[in-house]
Image (cartoon, rainbow, N blue to C red):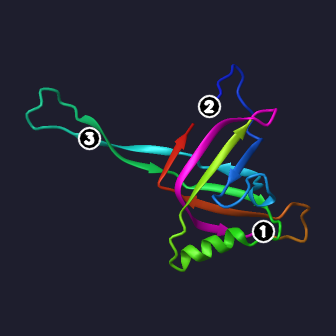
Amino acid sequence: MAVVRDNPYGGFNFLVNLGAGDPTSALGGFSEVSGLSMAVDVIEYRNGNDRINAPRKLPGLVKTGEVRLCRGVIGSTELFSWLQSVANGTQDFRTVVIQLLDEARNVVLTWTLSQAMPVRYSGAALSAEKSAVAIEELVLACQSITVT
């Protein structure tokens, strides 16, 4: 259930549950989530005998964006293993839940990705000349997104 307030929430406290395990564990500890989007295609249609010389706008297919999850490398191969199982033909769809938290760590908004599956994995960029955290990325495709 969404919690409404006057001031916007910060986007830095959130939990990700990949449909297997505890979202507060290190496996669900992501530093970035992006691409939470949904769009409706527009179909333009006009009869030849319409009195108005402009097409009608009708709703078409609904499309969801690819959701990108980034986290520091922690030595777990769970994300890559999930992608590997899908690449090998296993239909491993999951319900992924992303929860935005307020300052007191209460859930204020939830995005639910239905029938999510990994479609791309990127390992960390490694450089001997930089002082940076090694970040891995998992991209998910999903059937639908709901916000509550």
Crowd band around label 2 with a 10 angstrom C-alpha radius: few (<14), some (14–19), many (20+): few
Indicate left or right for 143 with 70 as reference.
Answer: left
Q: Name the residue under label 2.
A: 2
Which amino acid type is shown beneath numbered disc 2?
Ala
Front-lying residue, 56 or 85: 85
Q: Name the residue under label 1.
A: 125
Asked if the magenta segment contains residue 124, the reply would be yes
Q: Name the residue under label 3.
A: 44
Residue at 65 percent of width and 58 percent of height: 18
Q: Which of marks 2 and 1 is in front?
A: 2
Q: Please say if 58 is above or below 68.
A: above
- State the image coordinates of residue 68 (x, y, percent, origin top left): 64, 56
Which amino acid type is shown beneath numbered disc 1?
Ala
How far, Cα to Cα, is label 3 from label 1?
A: 45 Å
CB within 8 Å, label 2 to label 1? no
> Dot 1 lies on which element?
loop
Q: Nearer the viewer, mark 2 or mark 3?
A: 2
How far, Cα to Cα, is label 2 from label 3?
A: 34 Å
Indicate left or right for 86 with 133 as reference.
Answer: left
Which amino acid type is shown beneath numbered disc 3?
Glu
How far, Cα to Cα, is label 2 from label 1?
A: 37 Å
Indicate left or right for 137 with 29 as reference.
Answer: left
Q: Which quarter of the figure has residue 6?
A: top right
Front-lying residue, 35 or 142: 142
Pick whichever of labels 2 and 1 is earlier in the sequence.
Answer: 2
SS majority, magenta? strand
Magenta residues (range): 102-125
